[in-house]
Amino acid sequence: MLLLFSLFTGMSCSSSLFAQASKKGYEIILEVENLEDKQVFLANYYGDKPYIKDSIMAKDGRMVFKGDEALDGGIYLAVLPPNNQFVQFFISDGEQHFKIKADAANLAGSVEVEGSVDNKLFYDYMNFLGGQLDKKTAIEAKKAAAGDNQKKLDAITEEFKQLDQEVKDFHRDVLTHYPKTLTAAFIANRIDVDVPDFEGTEEEVHEKQWQYVKNHYFDMLDMTDPRLVRAPFLYQKIDHFINKLTVQHPDSLARSIDQVLTLVKPSEPTFKYYLVHFLNMFAKSKIVGMDAVYVHIVDNYYAKGLAPWTEEEQLKKIVKNANTLRPILIGKVAPNIQVEKQDKSKIKLHDVDHELTILFFWSPDCGHCKKAMPHMVDFYKEYKSKDVEIFGVCTEVQDKCEKCWPAIEEKNMGDWINTTDPFLRSRYKVIYDIRTTPQIFILDKDKKIISKRIGAEQVKGVVDEYFEIKKRKAELESGK
């Protein structure tokens, strides 16, 4: 605690902030020993990626980044030649005029800061952690040498506890004395959720712990701080929350995304970044069913005017895309279409009465379709007797439809229902968003979509799982 007392009493910030309040713009002076006289880049994080903002030629290891307008708050980097080492520093309102000294030969351990409380605090923290790591290494060596000596092992355990307590004390003191600094935010991000004890079975306790962590995961961070959009640690924390702590089901993901966006909404730049990030994330997702999250984001944010930065034409495309996807989301009743068989007789999709219907859009000239055909033929031979039907739709139009029937015969696809729609009267390409082939939708007895846009080789696995779930459900209902 003597170390902490020295640190905090020696860092009075009032005079520094007062002096900087009268200065406009920014001026960051870097003096780096053993640095080549080459171009140095100033970059800032946006989300998890750094973007170049400025560059300057180093002269005898000295560079000055300056401008008439203040920088947006966040984490910045000075990227140094020749190996793209970097000096990291924090920018906030009131602390945009300071000097950093370092040695390129020992960048990590040589940084000194003048004129910035936040950056000095950060590097003191880094040095403190380095010292703690050295202590930990020494204690681990003592543990290895202790063998089975329980008295020594008990003493070593106490040393580990003391080491941990010193870190906690440091964290507490920074958060208490400098709560508005980015260093405090950086530390708060590192502190794990303090989970209380719960009662119940092991499974019940695990569930309660998980829910508690999810509900309190962001408690230590001020998510409304606009500087954090330029802090990669926030991106990493949110990414972990969405992809690791959240069940990867569309409904769960939608709830977690709403939770994050609600927390960051008071910070316009942060809200904008993460709303766009989530939209793009699920627009590009190749995971079956995740288009439901995309539709949720569009319906609850873009369609409600909560993304005013989006150009009108682009907004129309986004909403239109969601409108196209909504009727064919997993769990929805597949839209009925009427197409025709080779003899020109009409048939509707909903007229097919089977336990499962595999809706299969394909084209004779499609290379991926040719690879899919053997899988579909083998699947049908095995599952036809299990009340499974394939409803094939050849996507050729007008005179080209005549190519469908020889291909069906050649590929031994004639045993299932085969159809075309020469003049696209059913509008199936629009309704089912058929932009490429093959496209597969698996429908249950009520024509609800249970899976879609999967490979032909995956159909068997999905169908097996469906029948297994149905079997287990029947056994539970019968009391077996």
Image: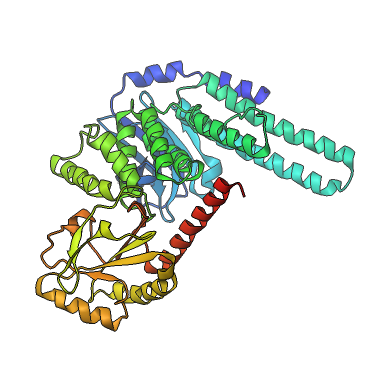
x then y, percent, for residue 92: 38, 28
**Residue 413 spot, x, y in % from top left:** 31, 76
Expressed as whole percent of the image width and height from the top left, the position of residue 274 reads: 34, 38
Res. 49 in view: yes
Q: Quadrant of the N terminus?
A: top right
Colour setting: rainbow
In this view, the residue farthest toward the front is: 478
Of residue 20 and residue 227, the one placed in the foreground of this image is 227
Most foreground residue, 45 or 335: 335
User: Residue at left 59%, top 33%?
Assistant: 208
Q: With respect to residue 385, does 123 lie above or below?
A: above
Residue for point 33% across, 45% down:
292
Query: Is residue 221 positioned above or below 365 on the image?
Result: above
Look at 84% across and 40% down and name the residue there. 153
Residue 122 visible within the image: no
Q: Nearer the viewer, residue 225 or 363?
A: 363
Residue at image position (44%, 61%) is 463
Q: Please state the total of marks drawn on the protein image.
A: 0
Where does residue 7 sit, x and y in percent of width and height?
Answer: 59, 24
In the rendered view, does 207 fall on the left or right side of 256?
Answer: right
- In the visual, does 156 lie left or right of 199? right
For the residue pair 132 and 414, the one nearer the viewer reads as 414
**Left or right, 376 with reference to 465:** left
Determine the residue located farthest toward the bottom in the rendered image.
410
